[in-house]
């Protein structure tokens, strides 16, 4: 009998897991899982938002793109180029570009580069060929840009010389035009294909 009492007393001292303790453990697992799920979802949403911002920034950069329309026409005095003239239009879906060189803000910049001279901001004149009368290049419009090479950079573009013009709108991608003059500058009007 004494043995049975000892056994019963020992059994009573051993405590099992109650329903309340099981519920607390289960709730703790659920809370940890919820916090982990929240962290994963918020990280995913943050990444998606950053990706969206990157896409919109890329679209904004390309929306102002211009295209060269026609050739680059050089006017020559018989030995060197005196003027460069070319047509510009917007690329499909592009935003309007300000081609008024007299504006002080939000203006398109023209740069000239060759093997010996680099001019970062050249004066130019814009003539609207097709448009609504302002110097804002909008979809469906065509503008002609003329750069006086003798007065501007003091550079001489002679025969067989390669040069680059960069047309830099306030927003959007640059238009880079690279041309080489012919072997003879005897013509007064030269189409630089």
Image (cartoon, rainbow, N blue to C red):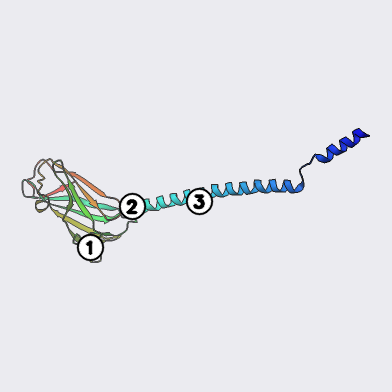
Q: Residue furthest top?
A: 3
Q: Residue furthest bottom?
A: 133
Badge 3 or badge 1: first in the primary sequence: 3
Residue at 10% from the left image edge and 40% from the top image edge: 183
The picture quadrant where one finds residue 182 is top left
Residue at 22% from the left image edge and 49% from the top image edge: 166
Which mark, by number, is residue 135? 1
Dot 2 crowding, Cα within 10 Å, few <14, some 14–19, many 20+: some
Q: Which residue is mark 2?
A: 61
Tell me where residue 171 appears, x and y as whole percent: 30, 55
Q: Which of label 2 and label 3 is nearer to you?
A: 3
Which mark, by number, is residue 45? 3
Q: Secondary structure at mark 1?
A: loop
Mark 3 vs 1: CB contact within 8 A: no
Q: CA distance from mark 3 to mark 1?
A: 43 Å
Q: CA distance from mark 2 to mark 3?
A: 24 Å
Q: Is residue 139 left or right of residue 113?
A: right
Q: Nearer the viewer, residue 90 or 164?
A: 164
């Amino acid at each position: 009998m004494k043995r049975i009492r000892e056994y019963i007393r020992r059994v009573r001292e051993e405590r099992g897991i109650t329903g309340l303790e099981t519920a607390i453990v289960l709730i703790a697992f659920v809370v940890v899982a919820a916090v982990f799920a929240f962290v994963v979802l918020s990280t995913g949403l943050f990444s998606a938002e950053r990706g969206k911002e990157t896409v919109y920034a890329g679209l904004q950069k390309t929306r102002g793109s211009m295209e060269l329309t026609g050739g680059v026409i050089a006017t020559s005095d018989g030995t060197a180029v005196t003027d460069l003239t070319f047509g510009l239009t917007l690329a499909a879906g592009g935003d309007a570009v300000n081609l008024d060189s007299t504006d002080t803000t939000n203006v398109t910049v023209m740069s000239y580069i060759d093997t010996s001279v680099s001019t970062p901001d050249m004066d130019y004149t814009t003539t609207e060929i097709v448009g609504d009368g302002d110097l804002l290049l909008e979809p469906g419009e065509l503008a002609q840009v003329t750069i006086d090479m003798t007065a501007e950079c003091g550079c001489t573009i002679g025969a067989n010389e390669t040069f680059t013009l960069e047309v830099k709108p306030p927003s959007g991608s640059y238009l880079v035009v690279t041309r080489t003059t012919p072997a003879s500058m005897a013509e007064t009007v030269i189409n630089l294909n």
